[in-house]
Image (cartoon, coloured by chain):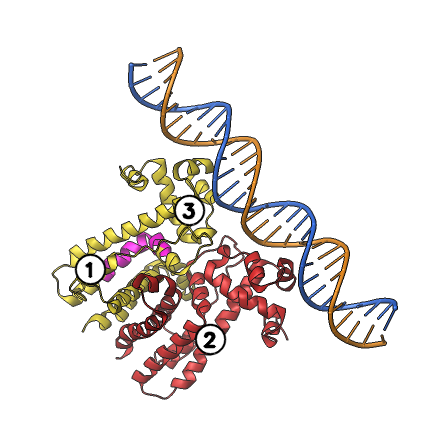
Chain colours: A yellow, B red, C blue, D orange
Amino acid sequence: MATPLEKARKDPDSMKARILKVARRVFGEYGYHGATTRMIAEEAGIDISTLYYHWGEKSDLYQGVVQDVFDDLRHKLQEVERVIHGRPFADRMEIAIDLTTEYLFENPEISNLVLLRYFGKTRDESILDIYVPDFISDIAYSMGLCKNKKAVPKGVSLQILAMMNSIHNFISGEGFFRSMLTMEREEYVSRVKETLKFILIPAFNT
Amino acid sequence: MATPLEKARKDPDSMKARILKVARRVFGEYGYHGATTRMIAEEAGIDISTLYYHWGEKSDLYQGVVQDVFDDLRHKLQEVERVIHGRPFADRMEIAIDLTTEYLFENPEISNLVLLRYFGKTRDESILDIYVPDFISDIAYSMGLCKNKKAVPKGVSLQILAMMNSIHNFISGEGFFRSMLTMEREEYVSRVKETLKFILIPAFNT
DNA sequence: ATGCTCCTCCATCATTTGATGGAAAGCCCC
DNA sequence: GGGGCTTTCCATCAAATGATGGAGGAGCAT
């Protein structure tokens, strides 16, 4: 029970965890400035000061959300790695894309938060700490693109980023893209998988 | 001199155009809620009420910015199309990636705004009007992926989106990715081009 | 010069939003 | 039951933010 975040995760029914869960979604949808503490409190069905009691400043809650989300993503990717380990390369890519995509479609706020964090600045200087996604090196190693997890070539890191972001884009942009192309959810999901395989597999299939 | 936006573009030294230019950058950096009318006015060196005099509500200014940015992007893509027209396919992709990437690196607020618009909601309901990027069909046609501009298959649209967004991601995420990988700007730009070609060319090079 | 239009700024307002203090309510241990 | 601890909510504050009214000024035609 070291960090407050761990505490919140241990007991998912605790008020602190409930707030975190709502905050993930609201911050993901509206971004840091677009989300207000009142919105989060209201959706959680509590008073705003209860939120402040548990989490302190808005930026602290946001930090908690970001760390929580990145942790979840890292764990999921490790799980995917275990599933595909040892299989032939072509299968690995296909399965990895399927599993990752499905997971993110179920937890779209992850993609939202990751992308908003990459692309949007914050007026509040304090929220800077560039959180180097350590899962990049995991993926690079797992795909056989580097021998040493500690020293991933820069070019490879960029390839991984391109890959991950392509996925996030389709998850996070679902609302926009789907209504643009007038698709049902189911069709969208399956076409997104298809498109990702179309784009990503040939590139890495040396 | 029909729309106010056209007026602003006709005379780029006009106050209205100056405000628009600053607003593009500020909205792009901080998003709709992260940007304040005061920030924009201050950066433009004018009083806040001058801004309101020319543009009315904040959301009107934002609408103007979005339209301006999408127009610029469409024009640039048409220009690129003219350059690559008639060349062999492999060359076309390479040149298109180079030109588009360079242009966006010079005008990063375009990528910022496009992505923020795709991925971020706004508390203000009024800003909804989903602006179907008509350049998608232009690109599809230009790449020979469809015969009829009016009827682009959905799968093709998704492929184009994946392609465009990959580019935008690297432009918009420059601050984050570059400091994550500790690169100078020049190296980043050239590696991004390389990575985009690595990912995109094999997929479409049937 | 007068009057007119257009533009800019200062002062100000109303609302939103981040944040807190203190009272009440629950809860546990004795 | 009572003391003490935690948790929740109501009332409220201060600052930030979107927005406006009106005074003044520049330019220009008459």
In the rendered image, residue B32, in percent from the top left (x then y), is placed at 50, 58
How far apart in space, not on screen, are marks 3 and 1 (Cα)? 31 Å
Q: In terms of secondary structure, what is the magenta stretch mainly?
A: helix
> Closer to the observer: label 2 or label 3?
3
Mark 1 nearby-residue class (10 Å; few <14, some 14–19, many ≥20):
few
Task: Indicate which disc residue A150 carries.
Answer: 1
Magenta segment includes A101: yes
Question: Are discs 2 and 3 both within one chain?
Answer: no
**CB atoms at circles 2 and 3 under 8 Å apart?**
no
Regarding residue A128, the answer to whether it shows in the image is yes
Count of number-bearing discs: 3
Regarding residue B147, the answer to whether it shows in the image is no
Judged left or right of residue A206, residue A69 is right
How far apart in space, not on screen, are marks 1 and 2 (Cα)? 42 Å
Give the secondary structure at mark 2: helix
Which region of the structure is painted magenta? Answer: A97-113
Magenta segment includes B204: no
> Closer to the observer: label 3 or label 1?
1
Mark 3 highlights which residue?
A59
Q: Amino acid at mark 3?
A: Ser
How far apart in space, not on screen, are marks 2 and 3 (Cα)? 38 Å
Q: Amino acid at mark 2?
A: Arg
> Residue drawn at (11%, 61%), measured in percent from left and top?
A86
Of residues A169 and D25, which is closer to you in this image?
D25
Of residues B34 and A185, which is closer to you in this image?
B34
> Closer to the observer: label 1 or label 2?
1
Mark 3 nearby-residue class (10 Å; few <14, some 14–19, many ≥20):
some
Question: What subunit carries mark 2?
Answer: B
Mark 2 highlights which residue?
B74
